[in-house]
Amino acid sequence: MRVLSGIQPTGRFHWGNYFGAIQQYIDLQNEDESYYFIANLHALTTIRDSDELKSLTLEAAIDLLALGLQPEQATLFVQSDVPEVSELTWLLMTGTPIGLLERCHAYKEKKEKGVAADAGLFTYPVLMAADILAYDSNVVPVGQDQVQHIEVCRDVARSFNHHYGEVFVMPDAKVLEASAKVPGTDGEKMSKSYDNTIRIFEPLKPQRKQIMRIQTDSRPMEDSKDPSTDHLYQLLSLFASDAECEEVAGIYRAGGFGYGDIKKRLADAAESYFSDARARREKLEQDPGFVQDVLNEGAKQARAKASEVLDRAQKATGLVR
């Protein structure tokens, strides 16, 4: 069983990235053959500054290693270091119906809002399909909002296999339910798009100040409150033990408390939760050669597999005489 997923380096990772995806990546590396890549080609649809993209790509690699991704157990690499994927994208594009791409969420949403969409955004799902198919991936962990892209990938692979024979393995989506359960500082889903994120490796003092500024309701302190509907409690429950969550839930129901106390608990819990990762990150920052070696070795392994799949596709289409 081979697991594959990618994450864009469009900004520093936040709590939503971790609990919505990265934590599951780390768990899955212990069970299956795992390929994880930093999707810098996809990031080109939003980042136009070369220095920024290079910096964020390296920071993403350091963050993933610090958070627990093990190069001995999972193949970690940068998307653009495997050019076979870009070539495979063209083979898939020649048989992908325009109507299929027009129905994809990201393109439709921009078009409906009157925002200019370039060809990169329009064909984004085909590059994603190539990412998946290039490694004979069986399972793709995604959030609920990305399931459509896996369906598109299956449609593209099914069409190619129909015309040229059984070239591609059909992948299945593994929906990461937690991806929809991480609220931001305003109560909406935590997302860079909403500017409501809390970064994992934000320096502790600024992070604590940010937590203390989390929006809360204006109900009187003495009122009883339902913890299940409160985003501050939901954030605390990501870090706290079951016993502490139950204790805090009782405080909510009893009323007579201040949100400031809960925010302090949250800040303390988050600091403790990521303390080991922060220590590992400090060491990795001092050893950029090691990080680069990990990415180089990951790219070598990924290219070996992608070359095998691309060769299979080229022979099937008649490109290799």
Image (cartoon, rainbow, N blue to C red):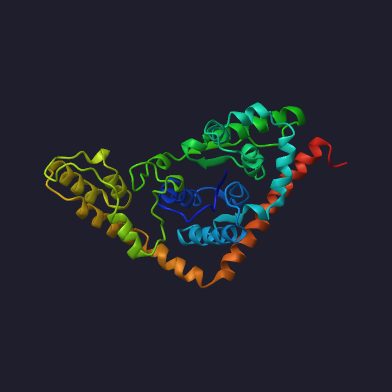
Quarter occupied by the C terminus: top right
- Taking 19 as reference, is 152 left or right? right
Depth check, front residue: 31 or 34: 34
The residue positioned farthest toward the bottom in the image shown = 286
Q: Residue 7, image x and y in percent?
A: 54, 49
- Image quadrant of residue 201? bottom left
Q: Residue 20, image x and y in percent?
A: 43, 45
Count how many numbered circles sit on residues in the image: 0
The residue positioned farthest toward the right in the image shown = 321
Is residue 288 positioned above or below 158 on the image? below
Q: Residue 77, image x and y in percent?
A: 61, 56
- Taking 95 as reference, is 257 left or right? left
- Image quadrant of residue 168? top right
- Taking 18 as reference, is 172 left or right? right
Is residue 49 positioned above or below 290 on the image? above
- Image quadrant of residue 266? bottom left
Depth check, front residue: 145 or 289: 145
- Taking 252 as reference, is 278 left or right? right
Q: Residue 277, image x and y in percent?
A: 42, 62
Quarter occupied by the N terminus: top right
Is residue 290 positioned above or below 15 on the image? below
Task: Determine the residue positioned at 53% across, 36% down.
Answer: 173
Task: Determine the residue positioned at 36% across, 41% down.
Answer: 188
Task: Determine the residue positioned at 33% across, 65% down.
Answer: 205
Depth check, front residue: 307 or 108: 108
